[in-house]
Image (tube, grey):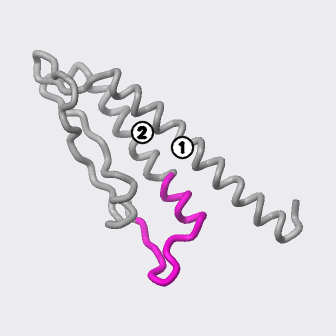
């Protein structure tokens, strides 16, 4: 996945909102894979690079999450509580981005008199 911007004006509102929703969808897939592998020995939880890094580099990178909590005796580093927090945060951020995208569309419709 990549993100392109106009060098003079930067990303437009809709491009930015769309990129945010794409980034959040990718993050949700990674979190779901982490949860699905919660019982896999030696599995390392992953996350996507930050949204800011995604915007500046134009590419989405996967990285191993730092070990903030204990690992299981079989070497698995997926903590379901941590993944549940990430999933909830991702869902609320996606809802906000979708709402902002919709409001932008409403404003344009109102400006051109089609509401």
Q: Is residue 26 left or right of residue 74?
A: right
Q: Are marks 1 and 2 in contact (CB under 8 Å)?
A: yes
Which residue has dot 1 on it?
94
Q: Residue at x 10, y 15 (%)?
A: 73
Q: Is residue 78 left or right of residue 60?
A: left
Does the magenta segment cover residue 16? yes
Which residue has dot 2 on it?
28
Label 1's element? helix
Give coordinates of residue 59: x percent, y percent: 33, 62
Give coordinates of residue 103: x percent, y percent: 71, 54
Does the magenta segment cover residue 15? yes
Q: Residue at x 33, y 59 (%)?
A: 53
Q: Is residue 15 left or right of residue 41?
A: right
The answer to whether residue 12 is above or below residue 81 is below
Which residue is more in the foreground, 52 or 42? Answer: 52
**What span is colored magenta in the figure?**
3-20
Give coordinates of residue 82: x percent, y percent: 33, 26
Q: Earlier in the sequence, mark 1 or mark 2?
A: 2
The answer to whether residue 106 is above or below residue 77 is below
Give coordinates of residue 98: x percent, y percent: 61, 48
């Amino acid at each position: 996945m990549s993100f392109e911007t106009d060098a003079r004006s930067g990303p437009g509102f809709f491009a930015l909102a769309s990129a945010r929703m794409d980034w959040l969808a990718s993050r949700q897939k990674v979190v779901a894979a982490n949860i699905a592998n919660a019982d896999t020995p030696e599995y390392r939880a992953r996350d996507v690079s930050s949204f800011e890094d995604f915007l500046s580099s134009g590419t989405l990178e996967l990285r191993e999450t730092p070990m903030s909590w204990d690992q299981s005796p079989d070497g698995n580093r997926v903590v379901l509580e941590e993944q549940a927090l990430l999933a909830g945060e991702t869902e609320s951020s996606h809802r906000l981005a979708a709402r902002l995208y919709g409001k932008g569309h409403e404003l344009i419709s109102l400006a051109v008199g089609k509401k």
